[in-house]
Amino acid sequence: MILVLIKRIGFYLLLPAFRVFRELRVIASNPKVKFGYRTRVVNSEFEGDNTVGSDTSLNQVQLGRGSYVANGAAIKYTAIGRFCSIGPEVLIGLSRHPMDMVSTSPAFYSKKRDACPLSFYQIDSYDEQLNTQIGNDVWIGARAVIVGGVTVGDGAVIASSAVVTKDVPPYCIVGGVPARPIAKRLSDEQIELVLLNPWWEWTSAKLKEYGGDFRSREQFLEKHYM
């Protein structure tokens, strides 16, 4: 096995050559971040207690505490909150192409030559990449797609293979192509109460003390929010 020496946060790691980290930043005194094999991470931040699966690519990503990304996902230019569950082969923050120009090819509006090796334009005249926001306690099912620029609210659920092209309200369940609302996880009154005092901002000690309450939604809300 070929090994490479990678400098990371002031010290060096000896890693397999096919498991490469580049410009990786970890924010937390004890981050506890686990990475799978063949994982590519560029200019990304991790709050701690995170897992990133194998064959996953993260570019300009912020991952909140307790959130994980399963195998085969590709995420870029995205801020992800705490305690989020990102399923396998999920795509988030996809670049967009212009629909009102003569051609949708980057050769005619971008000089970057990233995906397209040709460029007939001297300046970047179209904003391909928009920032994406994923709230806290969000579950995104396997092979879901979230286009760039979308905001997914706290507590939302994205069904497997859904294609999300518009913002998703907090605690809303969406699915389909394109994704449409299916149901709400909580009532409007309950959503308002939780967002005023979000449990994901509790300390580890408090979460450990009341962790058993999470098994019953009704009892949890009655005990901590009513």
Image: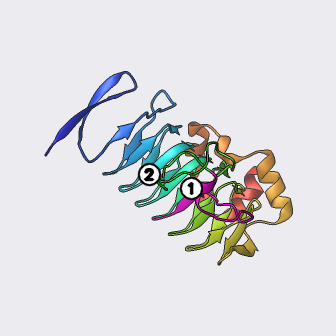
Q: Residue at horizontal 73%, vertical 75%?
A: 180
Q: Residue at horizontal 45%, vertical 30%?
A: 30
Q: Is residue 43 magenta?
A: no
| Residue sitting farthest toward the left | 1
Residue 97, by quadrant, is: bottom right
State whether residue 222 appears in this view. Answer: yes
Colour setup of the view:
rainbow
Choose the circle earlier in sequence order: 2 or 1.
2
| Residue sitting farthest toward the right | 189
**Viewer-nearest residue: 19 or 137:** 19
| Residue sitting farthest toward the front | 120
Task: Tell us which disc is closer to us: 2 or 1.
Answer: 1
The residue that disc 2 covers is 57
Residue range of the region highlighted in magenta in the rendering: 89-109
Left or right of 6: which side holds 78?
A: right
Say what secondary structure mark 1 lies in.
Answer: helix
State whether residue 134 appears in this view. Answer: no
Residue 99: where, in percent of width, then height? 71, 65
Residue 189, by quadrant, is: bottom right
Residue 117: where, in percent of width, then height? 46, 53
Q: Residue at horizontal 68%, vertical 62%?
A: 156
How many angstroms separate mark 2 from mark 1 (CA)? Answer: 25 Å
Say what secondary structure mark 2 lies in.
Answer: strand
Q: Residue at horizontal 68%, vertical 58%?
A: 155
**Viewer-nearest residue: 138 or 91:** 91
Q: Specify few, some or many for label 2: CA neighbours under 10 Å numbering under 14, 14-19, or 20 or more.
A: many
Q: Is residue 97 magenta?
A: yes
The residue that disc 1 covers is 107
**Viewer-nearest residue: 162 or 116:** 116
Residue 48: where, in percent of width, then height? 49, 38
Tell me the amino acid under the disc marked 2.
Ser
Q: Which mark is residue 79?
A: none
